[in-house]
Image: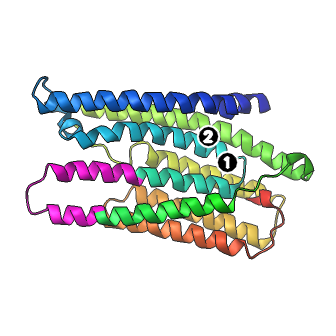
């Protein structure tokens, strides 16, 4: 199983996917930008996909979507490291997701001339505040979870726990591919049927559902070995923050933005409080 984990989530695979994602993001951006140019000069009839090409800012959606896909892969890779590391990567993903939404909303505002533009700008300002809060939370998690440990110096049950988390990460990687294929095919069929809406619920709503399932499994497996209250409460709090994010992804408007900020505040507070409490083992993360 370690060979499978190395093949699916190892350093070589990560390096290959990172380079591929960067190259694909550049190519996708140029292609999308070209489509916007063709639409602007009426060179080609692109009326069926007008919401995706009626502003040059729309071209930013493609590269950020590709980068987000890679960051989700990075989130899966972080699962065997520690619970708090994976939560930190989760906030990095959501931060980029909010940035992508801001670019999309700015593109929509750019083509608006009616009085509703004031309310649109107010919501964009709210999203910008949410971005700062999520970014700060992601940085806080990264700074607080940079310590690495030698697995050979840990207890047998911790090594077994890490192995189990590697198994789970490989399974989640397979789910990630299946959900991505399903989401892309469903959205493509919708475009052919005239449904051109593209929101953050596409892929991310389903993926975060499975991410919550994996977090709960990790919590239950860890409780077989670690029964102290502090790590149990901390990991439960982290799962709660993930659930709030999942609800926020499926909730449009200001309510979704507030849910994102609530999740960031909760996770940061839980991590800070856990630093004052001696835990049985850092791998309980």
Where's residue 138, x and y in %?
A: 55, 59
For mark 1, what is the residue?
A: 79
Q: Quick one: label 2 or label 1, which is nearer the N terminus?
A: 1
For residue 178, say whether it is visible: yes
Spatial separation of the CA atoms under disc 2 and disc 1 = 10 Å
The structure residue drawn at horizontal position 40% and vertical position 54%, both measured from the top left corner, is 98
Is residue 241 shown above or below 109? below
Foreground tag (2 vs 1): 1
Quarter-of-image position of residue 60: top left
For mark 2, what is the residue?
A: 172
Mark 2–mark 1 CB contact (< 8 Å): yes
The residue tagged with tag 2: helix, strand or loop? Answer: helix
247 left or right of 155 in image: left
Where's residue 201, x and y in %?
A: 38, 48
Where's residue 123, x and y in %?
A: 27, 64
Residue 96 or 169: which is nearer the viewer? 96
Q: Looking at the figure, which quarter contains the C terminus? A: bottom right
Residue 37 or 255: which is nearer the viewer? 37
Q: Looking at the figure, which quarter contains the N terminus? A: top right
Q: Main secondary structure of the magenta part?
A: helix
Q: Which residues are magenta?
A: 98-124
């Amino acid at each position: 199983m370690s060979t499978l984990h190395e093949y699916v989530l190892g350093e070589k695979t990560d390096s290959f996917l990172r380079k591929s994602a960067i190259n694909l993001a550049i190519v996708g951006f140029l292609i999308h930008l070209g489509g916007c140019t063709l639409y602007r000069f009426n060179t080609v009839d692109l009326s069926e996909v007008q919401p995706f090409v009626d502003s040059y800012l729309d071209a930013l959606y493609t590269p950020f979507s590709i980068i987000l896909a890679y960051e989700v892969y990075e989130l899966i890779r972080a699962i065997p490291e520690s619970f708090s590391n994976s939560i930190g990567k989760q906030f990095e993903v959501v931060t980029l997701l909010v940035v992508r939404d801001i670019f999309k909303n700015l593109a929509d505002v750019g083509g608006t001339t009616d009085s509703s533009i004031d309310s649109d700008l107010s919501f964009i300002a709210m999203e910008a505040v949410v971005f700062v809060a999520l970014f700060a939370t992601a940085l806080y998690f990264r700074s607080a979870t940079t310590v690495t440990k030698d697995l050979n110096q840990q207890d047998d049950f911790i090594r077994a726990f890490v192995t189990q988390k590697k198994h789970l990460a490989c399974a989640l990687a397979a789910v990630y591919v299946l959900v991505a294929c399903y989401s892309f095919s469903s959205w493509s069929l919708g475009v052919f049927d005239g449904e051109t809406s593209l929101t953050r619920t596409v892929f991310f709503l389903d993926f975060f559902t499975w991410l919550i399932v994996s977090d709960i499994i990790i919590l239950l497996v860890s409780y077989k070995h670690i029964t102290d209250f502090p790590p149990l409460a901390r990991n439960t709090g982290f799962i709660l923050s993930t659930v709030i994010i999942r609800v926020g992804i499926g909730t449009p408007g200001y309510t979704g933005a507030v849910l994102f900020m609530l999740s960031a505040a909760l996770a940061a507070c839980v991590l800070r409080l856990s630093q004052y409490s001696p835990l049985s083992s850092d791998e309980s993360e």
